[in-house]
Amino acid sequence: MNDRHTTIRTLHDIGAAVWMGGSLMGAVGLNGASQDIADSSVRARCGAA
């Protein structure tokens, strides 16, 4: 029974880490990279891709 709880907790932690990592990449990496584009109309397309 204890192994099951450990497995479920591990999967939960991995899922939370993946979600947080993806959100952090979008907020910091993608938005920061789009600031390097001079044309604002192209900048919006870059952020949405």
Image (tube, rainbow, N blue to C red):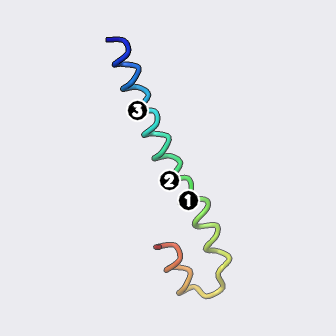
The alpha-carbon separation of the residues under discs 3 and 1 comes to 24 Å
Q: Given contact means CB atoms under 8 Å apart, are the residues at marks 3 and 1 in contact?
A: no
For residue 4, above or below residue 45? above
Q: Earlier in the sequence, mark 3 or mark 1?
A: 3
Read off the residue under disc 2.
23
Please name whichever residue, 42 or 2, is drawn nearer the observer in this view of the structure.
2
Read off the residue under disc 1.
27
Amino acid of disc 1:
Ala
| Image quadrant where residue 8 sits | top left
The residue sitting at 65% across, 74% down in the picture is: 35
The alpha-carbon separation of the residues under discs 3 and 2 comes to 18 Å
For residue 38, above or below residue 1? below
**In what element is the residue under mark 3?**
helix
Q: Given contact means CB atoms under 8 Å apart, are the residues at marks 2 and 1 in contact?
A: yes
Read off the residue under disc 3.
11
For residue 33, above or below residue 21? below
> In the rendering, at what x and y percent does residue 36 appear?
68, 77
Other-residue count near label 3 (Cα within 10 Å), few / some / many at <14 / 14–19 / ≥20: few
**In what element is the residue under mark 2?**
helix
The residue sitting at 58% across, 66% down in the picture is: 30
